[in-house]
Amino acid sequence: MSAFLPLVDSLDDHDLLRALARIGPLVVPLLLNDPASLPTDATRFVLFDSDSSQDQVISALDHGADKVILPLDLGKELIGLLPEDRLLLLLDVGNVSAVSDKVCHGVSGVLIKTPSVDPDFIGSFSRFFTGLTVHALLTPSSDPPSRSTIVALQTVKTTIVVPTSQLTLSTPDAKHLNIADAFLAPLTSDRKDGLFPTVVSSHPDGGRTLGLVYSSPESVKESILTGKGVYQSRRHGLWRKGESSGATQDVVRIRADCDADALEFSVVQHGAGFCHRERASCFGAGDLTGLAALERTLQARRAAAPAGSYTRRLFDDPALLRAKIMEEADELCRAETGEEVAFEAADLLYFALARCVAAGVSVTDIERSLDLKAKKVTRRPGNAKPQFTNQLSPTSEEPNESASTPPVSTLAPTVAPAPVAADDEPIRMRSYTLSSLSPPERAQLLRRPVLKSDEMIAKVKPIVDAVRTRGDAALLELTARFDRAHLPDPVLLPPFAPEATALPDAVRRAIDAAYKNIRAFHAAQADAAPLVVETMPGVVCSRFARPIARVGLYVPGGTAVAGCRSIVLATPPRPDGTVSPEVLYAAQLVGASAVLRAGGAQAVAALAYGTARVPKVDKIFGPGNQWVTAAKMLVQNDTDALVAIDMPAGPSEVLVVADRAANPAFVAADLLSQAEHGADSQVVLVAVRLADAAVAAIEDALDRQARALPRVAIVRQSIAKSIIVRVDSVEEAIAFSNDYAPEHLILHLEDAPAAVAAVENAGSVFVGPYSPESCGDYASGTNHTLPTNGYARQFSGVNTLSFQKHITSQEITADGLKDLGPIVATLADCEGLDAHANAVRIRLRELGHL
């Protein structure tokens, strides 16, 4: 237990904060929780107030907070959802009795705000919270505690919390407590000379013991205040390590043992080593072993390996090093016996550490990253990426990331990814009753898996930059790398060879029918004539549409009617370099001027900037994986590209509203039609007054149909994060749907058409039992590119107007300017834009109206 906990009430005194971080955790209010301004190695307990949100708590833990201290009401919401060892409760003396046994079992400790530090009074709380750590926070007007108070509270198993404004590195006074005095207060030595046995361990080398020394109150105080290793020599007094030898130490942490009679110093050792015999450790020769030894060897060889040596080849040839890492990883996976696993793991670690050393990354950096990841409370599903599994087809994704496994928040049960069902377990959604949920819980039902767009943009930027700067050469290299297709030319130009568009008659007739429906629906959307309005006599304003000249499409459909002069269709090629004949036939129908044989971020970059072979476009349309989406977002913000995009995109989703009239098999089929898109897809069933038996019938149909699908492995993952929401009325169902704003909304209701009037937010609505979402995807006539991830609140799906821009014009007669001109001049004067006013007045003078 720490002697005391400092409560950070200012970030101004950096020396004080660094010293405090050496001896224990810092309690940091949320408003001051800035890791960049706090000591790097500080242990942080983040303190929240009653206005804080669950998301803020999760974010603090994900960003390295060791514990969070929460008010009782907020704590109750998160108990069971957060690890108990990361959670403390903030209590007033008056609400201690409101803490139930269930709450106590869900936290590791309490912080009690109290006006008194009487040990008997505080001791009653320690007895009440048996098994928990107890901390006492004095009211702001209280004086700092004395050393004797700290000791007395330690006897009743309580740690006092002291504001940093009451702490000092200097001489203590009535208003300030010296932090070294506070740390030393509970320590007791069982030696006649009063010294404390002190174990010194090496911080970068995983706690390796360097030696045993002794400390005195004076040496401990100096170490805390200076951050340097200072000990007590039994012969020569204070021993400032390295003062004469240069083998100095930076102190990272000072801890007392469980009996408060011995110390441990964790240090970064410099120079020849800790031992006076110039060895790393006093215990033995001091030679490093294992990963630490390998790291030092690789670092030395990186600096001085002779030309032609194997290690030098690894550092000079990244492609060789990458190949060896992949080779050794594969051999480790194939190893069978324990001896083989150890042998192959050692090889893999050698090459992996060589990669780290080449990048300037140390084992300490790796350990720090592991520690930070261990502190996260949000988790990815952990599914294998498509290129490493046989369950998914090859795609045009960057091999280092998966488009189907975005981070999923584990904030609450409503969004936490349930364990994926094993093959012999039923495939089930999670079920909730809307009326029984609190507002925060209801809000969680609306959450989607969150894609970190800033991280994805950073990852696609090198790909986009390569195509922007090196054009076709980079495009062909990336296509060979990601699509496994080696092409002489990235572009196909019409007319396409008949054999390239050869299709079975049934497929050709289906595409023709779909094209006819899509064209008819989208042609009806086009602006037939300019909009003309006379806003006042002699002042005629108009708006007219013009097609966007050059567009790039990730999918074909309904665009030729907009009149675009140039249509470039991008599609990933097959490994032999050919393009699907269905895609080429559709490209031919819509009048594509070129087909780009590329996918992913590289295709987006080629469309945005153009290359010697790929025509530049003005706007990019079409859905894609997270790499495509991130690349679209990147290029639209680059003024060098001067390109627009249709909308942000996310994983596919559907919300189905069903009442007693719904056919369970139809509902299940509609849910599965979106669930099979990818592991990150989400489907929602809103059940209107459905009996348990009716819901069970839908679940049974879903399980039965899913098992018959070739993509059942994907369905298991997406269904595990999908939900059933029980509601009491159609009105409540549509209200929930409007809040969710689904990409696809399907209405299985007794009077489905009547419910459409209440729909405010949806990408596309499918009305009645015979309107499956699949029809909208392929052939009914509506567009398949729709807003996802809740963007249906702000965006429309792609339509004919998406391929047009609108230009306004005005024509003002002399009489019209006589009336309008003085208005304009007055407003220009108000803004201080004299030239604007002059442009009007010079004409009015010419007309004799001034």
Image: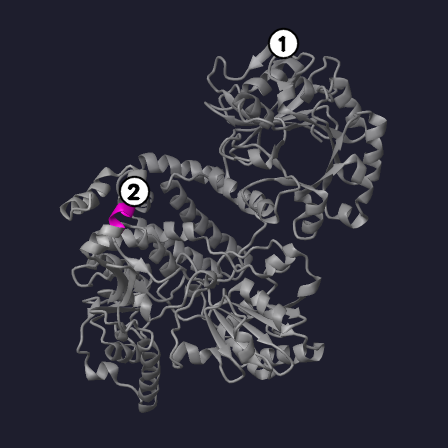
Q: Magenta stretch: residue 429 in it?
A: no
State which region is magenta.
820-824
- The image shows residue 694 at horizontal and vertical percentages of 67, 80
Which one is nearer the viewer's eye here, 834 or 565? 834
Q: Is residue 416 left or right of residue 466?
A: right
- The image shows residue 743 at horizontal and vertical percentages of 47, 68
Q: Residues within 10 Å of mark 2 (few under 14, many from 20)?
A: few
Mark before the other along the chain sequence, 2 or 1: 1
Please tell me whether mark 2 sits on a helix, a strand or a loop: helix
Q: What amino acid is labelled 1 in the image?
A: Arg
Q: According to the image, label 1 marks what residue?
A: 235
* Separation (CA) of disc 2 from disc 1: 92 Å
Question: Dots 2 and 1: beta carbons under 8 Å?
Answer: no
Q: According to the image, label 2 marks what residue?
A: 826
Is most of the magenta stretch helix, strand or loop? Answer: helix
Which disc is residue 423 wearing?
none
Total labels drawn: 2
Which one is nearer the viewer's eye here, 489 or 619? 619
Q: Is residue 398 visible?
A: no
Figure quadrant of residue 428: bottom right
Which residue is rendered at x = 49% and y = 77% of the image? 766
Q: Quadrant where the N terminus lies?
A: top right
View extreme (bottom): residue: 505
Q: Magenta stretch: residue 823 in it?
A: yes
Q: Is residue 795 above or below residue 127?
A: below
Q: Quadrant where the C terminus lies?
A: top left
